[in-house]
Amino acid sequence: MLEWLSDNRAYVAAVVIIMLVAMFIGSIVIGRKQTALTAKDEVFGDPERTKGGWYWAVCGVSTLLLIWFYFSWGVGRAYFPQAANEMCQVAKLEEVISPIKAALPLGSRYYKSTLLVGRNDVQLTTLRNDFPANAFSAAEQAELKDLIVQIRSLIANSSNPTLLNQKTKDELVNLSGQIRALGDELRAGSRGLTPTAEALAQPKWGISLTEIPLLPTTSKGVLFDNVSAKAQDLTSFFRKVRNHVPVNERIIADVRERIKVLKATNEAGSFDEKTDVARKAYVKGVERIFRRLDDGNIFPAASLDGLNAAIADLDAAKDEARGSLRFVEAVFFPGQGVVKSRTQCTEQGSARWLPKPTDVVATFIQLANPDLENGGGYKGTTLLWWKWLPIADVVGFFFPDWVADVWPGEYARHSADGTITPNFKDKLLSFAQGEVYLGSIPMFEGHIWDSLFRVLVALGLGILLGVPLGLFMGVSKFFKSFFDPLIELYRPVPPLAWAPLILTIFGITDDGKIFLLFMVAFAIMVISARTGASGTQLTKIRASHSLGATDRQIMWNVIMPNAMPEILTGIRIAIGVCWGTLVAAEILAGTTGIGFIENIARTVSNYELIWVTILIMGILGLIFDLIMRWVIDRTIPWRGKG
């Protein structure tokens, strides 16, 4: 069942989108009716006014999901499943003709020849102005300046339309005609064209590692695929077209020989180091520009006008052949569309880094599968499952070995016949080390549980030690004066600043991560408890004294209840900060946990997996917060009603 849903996730998304639209509209209708009914009974500022309103929650969630579906191309894939493949075929044609476009103003504002002429002219002028006269003799200076003049003449001759040889003219005219023929083929339409059986057998869009099927699956896609194959041959032919002006042949041979002589002089001469460097650098600069002009890539601008017009005609024909695909792409596929690289077509824009909700769900289902042998879990560990945990392991964790060491007596020794008879001290050590079988209990395991365990243990220790210290700091001059500088010294430091030091000391085990989270939770709980204790009304404390209450009774029955709102709020804050810090710590050093999964996914650019980890962290954080809200409502129901 799950496999069918994964293979048909586009159809599932189509149904879900309709349901979300219905929920969005229905929640607005219900919300407006409820608002009208209670408008006269509600008072602005009343906390009770914010309770309920589930319909607005539905409205917000459905809006967020609809936006996600739209910008991730989920809507486009749900209702136009063949569009991406057709966009891929159009991208093929665009990729094929891009080398020709790069040489024309249609693709880069200027003719490539114009850019080459301008760049070489600037560099020749720079060489002329920065001439190192002290490094060359008078004859060599005259020789180099004449070389610059000759190289400039190469540019002028290549740019002169009257010197363009007839063969190059015919090649450009022929190329322009064939490109126009491709435009006519696009305008003729795709009637009678059918995709191959191999193309139809490709995995659906988004199902396999190949993001978009590469072979055309519609008649329109076949049309663009055929045209792009023919355009590939034309592009290859264009790359071989050269403007070898006959008059330049003599100049090129002469300049090449003169540069060769100058280089030989540089190698054979005995110059000081500074002069030698200057001479070689200058001759090399002249030769570098000359070599760029030797390949015949500069054409007269007018000679390429026909080619430019042919490419413009092909673009117009491409837009006409796209037909309704232009509207679908503009409306339902926001961003840059599809780009064809050498081996695949990829989504661009927001769809590149924002996976579709159904893809994220499919990835989550695969991760949540506890069957590791069949591809479940991640890196040999389940996402969240259970196992039988020996009770001895739990006892061994909490029962220290030194208890056996301090027990009177000695550990057993082997006898003369080579046997060992354990005594009570040996059995106590085995018990402390978890080697005594005490049965097993079910226990969670997996990446999620590892992260939860680290947060819960650190948070528990932070509450257990931080709340009492904070309360005493709120009522005792000694505790406040002694501990306040220590707490405030490390509290402002960002947790990640401590991470490298702590992880270096403790390693990548859980100890370092738990200690780092404990530092975070401890400081927050101390400040919260201290603020709550110091904020207790003095009249309540004096009334308790007058009634004969002891210090312990005042702390437990007066100060503690007054500090509870601050303490519980501190716990909510500590959970959020610990959760964020944990993920960062697992990214820095870890072999399990949600942060570990996200770090590996980041290195391989697995956006679906990254978003799965983000959603898991968000959902778990929301669950923690909902639990704390329930605890607050149960323990301090009077808050906000005084």
Image (cartoon, grey):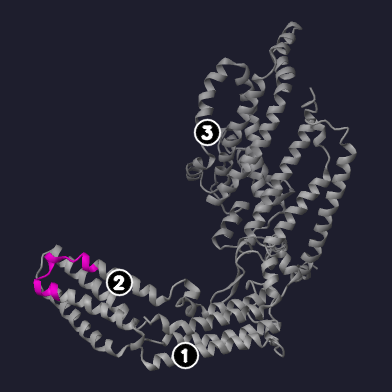
State yes or no: residue 427 in magenta. no
Q: Which residue is mark 3?
A: 492
Residue 339 drawn at (x, y percent): 58, 72
User: How far apart in space, not on screen, are marks 2 and 1 (Cα)?
Assistant: 29 Å
Residue at the image position 63 percent from the left and 52 percent from the top: 594
Residue 4 drawn at (x, y percent): 78, 71
Q: Which structural element holds mark 2? A: helix
Q: Amino acid at mark 3?
A: Pro
Q: Quadrant of the C terminus?
A: top right
Q: Quadrant of the N terminus?
A: bottom right
In the image, which residues are magenta?
127-142
**Marks 3 and 2: which is nearer the front?**
2
Residue 55 drawn at (x, y percent): 83, 47
Q: Which residue is mark 1?
A: 173
Residue 16 drawn at (x, y percent): 80, 62
Q: Amino acid at mark 1?
A: Val
Question: Is 22 rendered above or below residue 140?
Answer: above
Q: Amino acid at mark 2?
A: Asp
**Count the marks: how many?**
3
State yes or no: residue 135 in magenta. yes
Q: Which structural element holds mark 1? A: helix
- Front residue of 620/409: it is 620
- Front residue of 37/517: it is 37
Left/right of residue 404 with respect to residue 43 in the rendered view: left
